[in-house]
Image: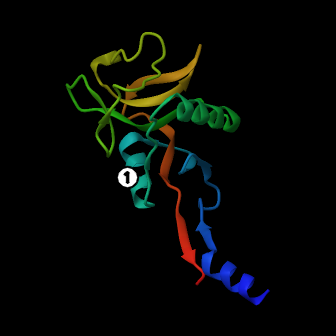
């Protein structure tokens, strides 16, 4: 019996940590849904100040999960981290600068760069729930994202 307890104590590893209170977890990331509207640059700065970034959408599964959360929280227009550098055609996720070639979910007719100044992305609930380009100076709720913290502790 003592030998079993010692073996168990030597091999057990436990996970500690997780998402901060009020954040939601999905596939290794924590998300904070911030209702207070801010311009895109201010939302970006706020997320950075808390060790996070504006949400980056890497595929349909994460996009649909975020849309479901927004629907549940009654958010209808929400900033995430996609932006287009002035006069560039390519949309990039900030701060990783990963492009959207692998996945996008633009609403019909988008991006349209209406008024020639729509350089940021919002998830917008209109006829369908998808992406819309928007002027970065508009104020919107926003989603911060950070990696889930998992710490391993060896109990030897």
The quadrant of the rendering that contains the C terminus is bottom right
Instruction: Say left or right for 21 vs 117.
Output: right
Q: Residue extending furthest right?
A: 1
Q: How is the image coloured?
A: rainbow
Please give the residue where the numbered disc 1 appears in the rendered image. Answer: 45
Q: Does 146 appear above or below 76?
A: below
Q: Position of residue 44 (x, y in %)?
A: 39, 47
Q: Position of residue 49 (x, y in %)?
A: 41, 60
Q: Secondary structure at mark 1?
A: helix
Identify the residue at horizontal 70%, vertical 36% (top origin).
72
Q: Position of residue 105 (x, y in %)?
A: 47, 22
| Any part of residue 108 in sight | yes
The quadrant of the rendering that contains the N terminus is bottom right
| Any part of residue 75 in sight | no
Q: Does 59 appear above or below 81?
A: above
Identify the residue at horizontal 69%, vertical 78% (top origin).
8
Task: Return the residue nearer the eye: 50 or 140.
Answer: 50
Q: Does 9 appear above or below 142?
A: below
Q: Residue extending furthest top?
A: 109
Q: Residues within 10 Å of mark 1 (few under 14, many from 20)?
A: few
Number of labels in the image equals 1
Instruction: Say left or right for 99 vs 133.
Output: left
Residue 62, quarter of the rendered image: top right
Q: Residue extending furthest left?
A: 87
Q: Does 27 appear above or below 14?
A: above
Identify the residue at horizontal 56%, vertical 78% (top origin).
154
Q: Position of residue 39 (x, y in %)?
A: 41, 41
Task: Return the residue nearer the eye: 8 or 29.
Answer: 8
């Amino acid at each position: 019996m003592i030998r079993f307890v010692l073996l168990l104590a030597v091999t057990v590893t436990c996970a500690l940590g997780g998402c901060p209170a009020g954040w939601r977890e999905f596939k290794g990331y924590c998300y904070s849904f911030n209702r207070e509207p801010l311009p895109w640059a201010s939302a970006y700065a706020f997320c950075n100040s808390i060790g996070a970034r504006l949400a980056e959408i890497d595929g349909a599964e994460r996009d649909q999960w975020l849309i479901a959360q927004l629907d549940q929280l009654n958010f209808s227009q929400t900033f995430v981290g996609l932006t287009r550098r002035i006069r560039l055609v390519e949309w990039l996720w900030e701060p990783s600068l990963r492009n959207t070639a692998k996945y996008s979910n633009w609403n019909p007719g988008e991006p349209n760069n209406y008024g020639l100044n729509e350089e940021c992305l919002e998830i917008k609930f209109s006829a369908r729930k998808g992406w819309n380009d928007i002027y970065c100076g508009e104020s919107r709720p926003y989603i911060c994202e950070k990696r889930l913290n998992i710490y391993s502790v060896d109990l030897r």
